[in-house]
Image: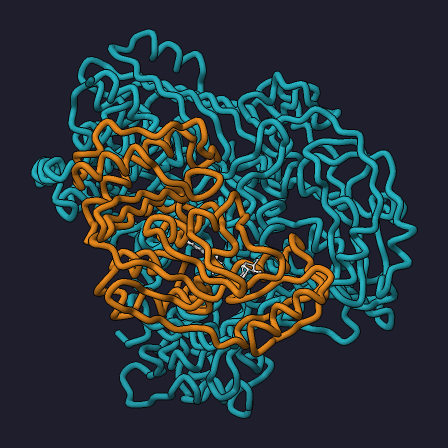
Amino acid sequence: MSETGIGQRVKRKEDHRFITGKGRYTDDINLPGQTYGYFLRSPHAHATIKSIDTSAAKKMPGVAGIFTGEDIANDKLGGLICGWMIHSKDGSPMKAGPHPVLAQGKVRYVGDHVAFVVAATKEQAKAAAAAVDVSYAVLPHNVDAAMAMTAKAQVHDVAPDNRVFNWSLGDQAATDAAFKAAAHVTKIDLVNNRLIPNAMEPRAAIGSYDSGSDHFTLYTTSQNPHVARLVISAFHGLAPEHKLRVIAPDVGGGFGSKIFIYAEEVACVWASKKIGGRPIKWTAERSESFLADAHGRDHVTHAELATDATGKITGLRVNTKAAMGGYLSTFASCVPTYLYGTLMSGQYAIPNIYVEVDAVYTNTAPVDAYRGAGRPEATYVVERIVETAARELKMDPGEFRRKNFIKSFPHQTPVIMCYDAGDYAAALDKALQIADYKGFPGRKAESAKRGKLRGVGFSAYIEACGIAPSAAVGSLGAGVGLWESAEVRVNPVGTVEVLTGSHSHGQGHETTFAQLVSDRLGIDIDNVAIVHGDTDKVQFGMGTYGSRSGAVGMTAISKALDKIEAKAKRVAAAVMEASTNDVEFKNGTFTVKGTDKKMAFGEVALAAYVAHKFNSAEIEPGLKESAFHDPSNFVFPAGVHICEVEIDADTGVTEVASYTAVDDFGNIINPMIVEGQVHGGIVQGIGQALTEGCVYDKESGQLLTGSYMDYCMPRADNVPSFKLGFICTPCPSNPLGMKGCGEAGAIASPAAVMNAVTDALGVRDVPMPATPQVVWQVMQPMKKAAE
Amino acid sequence: MENFAYHRPASVADAVAAMKKAKDGKFMSGGMTLLPTVKQGLAAPSDVIDLTGLKNSGISVSGSSVTVKAGTTHVDVATDKGIRQVVPALSALALSIGDPAVRNRGTIGGSISNNDPAADYPAACLGLGATIHTSDRKLAAGEFFTGMFTTALKPAEVVTAVEFPVPAKAGYAKFPNPASRYAMVGVFVAKLKDGSVRVAVTGAGPAVFRVPAMEAALARDFSAKALAGVTVDAKTLNTDMHASATYRAHLIGVMAKRAVEVAK
Ligand SMILES: Cc1cc2nc3c(=O)[nH]c(=O)nc-3n(C[C@H](O)[C@H](O)[C@H](O)COP(=O)(O)OP(=O)(O)OC[C@H]3O[C@@H](n4cnc5c(N)ncnc54)[C@H](O)[C@@H]3O)c2cc1C
């Protein structure tokens, strides 16, 4: 195996430019004649706009244009869409309220877009925005998912009770019957706290219009530039696709928040034409990111688990209220439904499952997919209630899980998913061993000597990623297919360019994708370039999210490489005067069976372009192939995480004392990159469990956690050194046997941490984030009781 | 951000004169607090008078006192060998401020003049009974810190140095706000050479304050267990999303004990 092939810890090719400051992000790009855009945002959580007077502001120095919802309406610029249709239990379609690019008549959250001010400098745009006179009539507001259906505030006319849909999955009657017959029922109430994504690079966009060619260009911080082009073209109606180029250059992290098509980028590209074609740049300030990036999670759930007398799980019932915010963001509706309810079987053979979800409007920033999207919420429900049931049944939480694990594959769950491969007991065994679970009582006693409360918690998560089979998601309401494309261009000298529809914004595709090519073609990894993020270069693509770039994106590349190999064999056969069937390709060399004839890959590439040695009527010159890959199933990474925490009873401070993660990602291309993804995911999950929580003030509707002074990102000293292990059951539905690793850490960890915290304290629940104050408060009644 | 006129005087007298001339001037030392507020539009001074031109930094340690010039950065206080010998609690406090970037720019003069209710230095000043030297006078710490973000400084008065008495023993225990890492509760305890005890609390109330009940208890017996049962009334303390007044009152008790335990 070569040193840069599949399975090798190849250092990331892209890191040189990132760590030497040579990355080229949207804000690094400056176009001639560029102007700056600034959004005047709503200071109110909910209000009608009585009037907007821009006359004084328009006269301010440097102003090139000021636009409001009226201009959007006059131009018939389409609204922002939610691309996944969900139907309620009663068959009615979800109630999608209008989502104009700039507010029309009403604002629905603090930070909503009221006016777009464009000026020669950012300072001038800001100054002019301050001079825009908006008169509001404040309306009652509600920021709380649990209260939405009974709140005085009515966010959208189409949804009088603020309910977007009332969706269900599973057989309610059979599940109710299972509960009637149960020997024991475990009940739990959970809140999955709202999170703010906080990508390191804030969102940014540059829109420009060229009147000469009647052509628009949009630079944007996107995880999926082709989808952005499709939506801006087909739904906003700005320009047909061949007259709109979308470029997502280096992008500094997304975590889902850059999947969506936002008002800001549409406004920049639309308004550029209105000001005569001068480019307009907008770069979010960090406080705008807090206010107006799509947030994550925000669920309120009641769940019940039925078990029989032997400790076998016989049923699961889940009822969730999921906040959508003030508008439905691009994929908001699929997150608490088909990315959530479908994972409720966890790793367990549960015969009866019923899930009901009310999605509700609240006067907050829109909520959409955030690292894990629905699957962390599902795992949190399943793994918290399973752990609680084990405690109630006085069974070891590991052994209770083992007893209920799915043991044979494929396994059809009652909630759509058909798991293809896995070995959950193997992951559990390995995790127990790495975590030294047997030694826990000793460590607990040792902690107690120091006055600390120690707890241990499990999370045996499963997720469905490698998103997703197009026909399947289509039947569930998706507006798009979720295949991926690749084009492999071999240059005459044998170097290779791969054009991929996947988009790297931290994942390291320039390295892992090149490893695949290096491995398959036997060429130096430095002779491979990965091209992505530009609709003028790459044929089409669905982008990167849902841990799909390996399983789906790389499979497309692999298929294109199959075609390259087949074609190259024909060329080699012609040149070496052999039959194609006798040509073999290994380690970058073509040989003819039974002879000593051979040609290097580069020689064959050159021969393909020189085209002297074959009949062009039979073999087309050139060496370039493309492929589209539509997966036949989701992929199902799974694993067991074990967390130990130590709580300072005096202050309520929780320390993650140790964290073990054993994951099954199938075959791994680059273990170093995978470990990095796992580390990052676990840190985000520890953040959700212990430090991060988005808080809106109930009284005022203002965002209280609007900066890092109050929104607590996890830091290096909040996390231990992780202990990782891997098992491998190759994925049967793609030729590389890969699953996805990008989200697993964030999916698994909140439940592991909170199971450990509740174990340490001996309580059923502690709300997330379990900050020192929260833990201390939980301990107060216990202390009183002890006194 | 609004534009402003920038001055960099070379003497305290010039700095005072520049301030007197300015319509709405602001002194600037490290700029770690001032500049973010200016950038966010929360402050819009007509003139910024940069005090780094005074070259007023440096530490001198004598048997009875430690004098830190106003322009001395947090990192210099944290790493000064003399301070580490005679008041290690002060070194530890300086090291607990912000992050390396903040410690490399932020100054003691800027910190105490700003008198952020969650800042660390005010606890050391009040806890040790420091004397604040200004362009006009000398003030006892107890007179200097007057309230939330307010001090006894007159509009054109410059802090020039802080003089700390060398204590017999002192300790600082900080419970950081999980997000900002400023003090959510910070307690500085000192047993002075004359045998008196001072306990100063930052982060918990509108401004740094002393706790006479704890001082009395520790004067009798300078040990953590002497503080058992000594409580602080939550009524005057801050409540925010990170900590209720009751929780802060509780933390004052815990941090006071820890400060006594680490006192050297
Ligand atoms: C990310 C971050 C984290 C921080 N964490 C902490 C922390 O944990 N604990 C903590 O205590 N602090 C913390 N700080 C504040 C930090 O210590 C600042 O450096 C300090 O508060 C101000 O010092 P400065 O020299 O930067 O003052 P500047 O920002 O320059 O000035 C602050 C104020 O003091 C006035 N001023 C400055 N010098 C003088 C003078 N000589 N005479 C009169 N007035 C003067 C200015 O006019 C201004 O009003 C943090 C700051 C940041 C940015």
Q: Position of residue B128 (x, y in %)?
A: 32, 52
Q: Position of residue A264 (x, y in %)?
A: 70, 53
Q: Position of residue A318 (x, y in %)?
A: 43, 22
Asked if B246 appears above or below B102 in the picture, the reply is above
Asked if A577 appears above or below A307 in the picture, the reply is below
Q: Quadrant of residue B65?
A: bottom left
Quarter the N terminus of chain A occupies: bottom left
Q: Identify which residue, A12 or B200, lies in the foreground.
A: B200
Identify the residue shown where x is 56% and y is 72%. B12
Identify the residue shown where x is 27% and y is 33%. A757
Identify the residue shown where x is 64% and y is 37%. A328
Q: Quadrant of residue A445?
A: top left
Q: Identify which residue, A435 or A534, lies in the foreground.
A: A435
Judge from the rendering whether residue B74 lies leftward or rightward of residue A99; answer left or right.
Answer: left
Instruction: Please give the letter of the chain rendered in orange.
Output: B
Q: Identify which residue, A207 or A492, lies in the foreground.
A: A207
Whether residue A218 can be seen here: yes
Whether residue A746 can be seen here: no
